[in-house]
Amino acid sequence: MLLVRNLIIALFFSSLVCTVGGANLDSSGKEISKYKKILEQNPNDCFSLSQLGAIRQYRREFYQAIELYDRAYSICGNLLDLFQIAFTYYIVGDYDKGRKLAKQAINLASEKGDKELESMFLKEFEYLESQIQ
C-alpha cells in the first residue's frame, strides 16, 4: 500500500514535469523522438536528458529514467537531476540508494549556499522517509 502511494505521488510529480514540458502519455513518444534528435546533434544537452528522464519516469520506465538523470547530472551537475535520481530510487523501493543520493543532494545544496534548494530537498526527503517507516 505504501509503495503504491509513493508511486502515485511520483507519477503525479512526473506528470507535472511532463505537462510543463508539453508531454502526456499520448504524446510522450513524439516528445521522446524530439529530444533524441536534439541529443543526436548535442549528446551533452542536459535539458534534453532531464526531459527524457521525466518522460521515462512518467511512463514508469524507472531505470531508464535513472540512467538519463544520471547522465545529465554527470555532465552538468544540476542538483535537481541528482535529487530526481534519489526520488526514483525511492519509487522502485531501493531506499538505501535513494536515501544516500538525497542526502548527497541536500549536502551539496548546503555547500553551495543554496538555502532554498536545500530546504526543498530536505522537505521532500523527510516526506519520503516518513512514507517508508
Image (tube, helix red, strand yellow):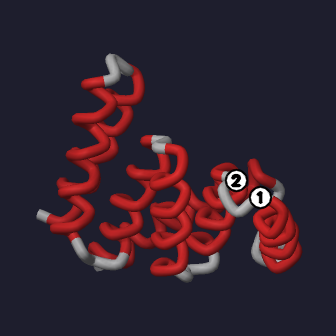
**Amino acid residing under circle 2:** Asp
- Hey, which quadrant is residue 57 in on the image? bottom right
For label 1, the crowd category at 10 Å Cα-Cα, with few meaning under 14, some 14 to 19 and many 20 or more, is: few
Q: Residue at x 26, y 25 (%)?
A: 111
**Contact (Cβ within 8 Å) of mark 1 with mark 2:** yes
Residue to which mark 1 is pinned = 42
Tell me where residue 65 appears, x and y as whole percent: 53, 72
The image shows residue 79 at horizontal and vertical percentages of 43, 41
* Residue that badge 2 annotates: 45
Which residue is pictured at 83% across the width and 56% down the height? 22
Q: Where is residue 103 shown, x and y percent of the image?
A: 21, 46
Q: Residue at x 48, y 78 (%)?
A: 62
Identity of the residue drawn at 20% across and 58% down: 99
* Of residues 14 and 3, the one drawn nearer to the viewer in this rendering: 14
Give the left or right position of residue 50, taking residue 41 as reference: left
Q: Amino acid at mark 1?
A: Asn
Q: Position of residue 77 (x, y in %)?
A: 46, 43
